[in-house]
Image (tube, rainbow, N blue to C red):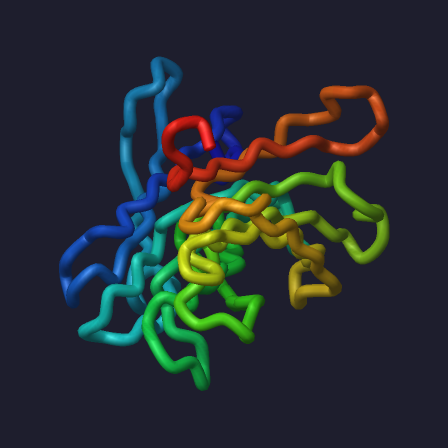
Amino acid sequence: LIGDLDGDGRSEVAIGANDQRTNRQQGRVYVSFLDADGYMTSYTLIRDEENGGPNLPRGFDIEFGTSIAALGKFDDDSVPDMAVGANNLRRAGGDALGDGAVFMVFLNSSGAAKSHWNFTLGAEDDAAAFGTSLAATKGLGDTTTQNQTALVVGAEAYSADTGRVYIAWVNATQVLSYTYIDAVTVDEELFGAGAAALGDLNGDGVTDLAIGARGIINNH
């Protein structure tokens, strides 16, 4: 659920299809409009240079739509926006596919993208799959200034599939700061395969997180 784009009182749904195979696995996102019973009545497709989608490299597995997080009304209009992971995109100057990136996608009421920009972190490690998972929350750090949101970003392949989770404080135009959480000790843990903001579970005023680590086996 990404919020009510068209003002009908019902939230729209953004669905990623990162394995879509036109021009290999470039990926796409469907912004779906629902009726009162939850049935889809129409959709807007955001993909490579369509409906405002980013210009994605042709002939490579980019996997745009791997993950999606609702940002709320993040820029200066009244329409909700979203962040979209593309965990196989090669960053500028990178040596290999799989570095990954997160696209900040600003929507209009039809579900098309009116603008976007992207970022990646962890340049010291190629093929980290940055953007494997995404969650957004106002409950981490100081998000009261510059209209910030804390964006939790999984990079499950960081350091030979050990994994890392980044917390980036972003506003509508830039990454303001970030920190990260490393996997505990397990090799090939794939820490960061999933991420969810849970709210304040223990009453300390800070949002708590659930992080997936799909590489752990046998309870180790």
Count numbered badges in the picture.
0
Question: x%, y% of residue 137?
Answer: 67, 39
Depth check: 137 or 109 in front? Answer: 137
**Front in this rendered view, residue 100 or 158:** 158
Residue at position x 74%, y 52% in the image:
148
The relative height of residue 126 versus residue 211 in the rendered view (above or below) is: below
Residue 202: in sight, yes or no?
A: yes
Q: Position of residue 213 (x, y in %)?
A: 46, 39
Q: Nearer the viewer, residue 147 or 191?
A: 191
The image shows residue 153 at horizontal and vertical percentages of 55, 51
In the rendered image of this protein, does residue 95 appear above or below residue 46?
below
Question: Which residue in the rendered view is the most extreme toward the top?
Answer: 37
In this rendering, position of residue 63 left or right of residue 80: left
Question: Viewer-proximal residue, 124 or 202?
Answer: 124
Q: Residue at x 45, y 50 (%)?
A: 187
* Quarter location, residue 146: bottom right
Query: Can residue 79 be seen?
Result: no
Q: What residue do we see at 69% from left, 48% from top?
A: 150
Res 180 → quadrant: bottom right
Decide if residue 47 is on the left or right side of residue 130: left
| Relative to 34, 152 lies left or right | right
Residue 116, above or below 107: below
Residue 177 placement (x, y as % from top left): 74, 63
